[in-house]
Image (spheres, helix red, strand yellow):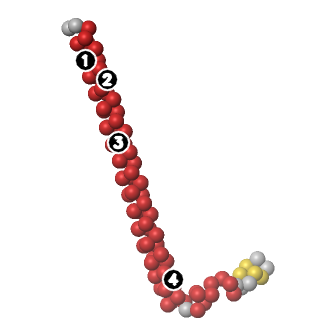
Amino acid sequence: MSGLEVVGVIAGIISAYTGAHVVFQNWRKARESRRHNKQNLKLDNSLVVGSSTIQQTYEDHFARLGQRFAVGDIELTWDCGSFS
C-alpha cells in the first residue's frame, strides 16, 4: 500500500467516525425531543383530568354534606386547643 492509499484509508475512517458521530447526535436530540413531548403530553393530560376530577370530587362531597362542606373550616373556631 502506498503512502497515498494509507492517507485515503485514514481519511475514510475519520470520515466514517465523524458521520457516525453526527448521526448519533441527531438521534439523541430526536430521542430527547420525543421524551420531552411525552412528558408534556402527560402533564397536559394530568391538568385536564385533574381539574375535572377535583370538580367531580367537590360535587360528590357537596351532594353528601351540603352547605357545610361548601363553607369548609371557616366557621370553625379555636377553643382551648381544639376545634368546636
Between circles 1 and 4, the one closer to the viewer is 1
- Between the C-alphas of marks 3 and 1, the distance is 26 Å
Residue topped by disc 2: 14
* Image spot of residue 8 (x, y percent): 25, 17
From the image, tell me which residue sits under label 4: 58
Query: Which three-letter amino acid code belongs to the residue tagged 3?
Result: Asn
Q: Which mark is residue 9?
A: 1
Q: Amino acid at mark 2?
A: Ile
Name the kind of residue labelled 1 in the image.
Answer: Val
Per the rendering, the mark at residue 26 is: 3
> Which image quarter is the C terminus in?
bottom right
The residue shown at (79%, 79%) is: 80
Q: Do residues under tags 3 and 1 come within 8 Å of each other at their CB atoms?
A: no
Q: Nearer the viewer, residue 19 or 50?
A: 19
The foreground one among 36 and 18 is 18
- Residue at 51 percent across and 83 percent down: it is 58
Disc with the residue nearer the chain's start (1 vs 4): 1
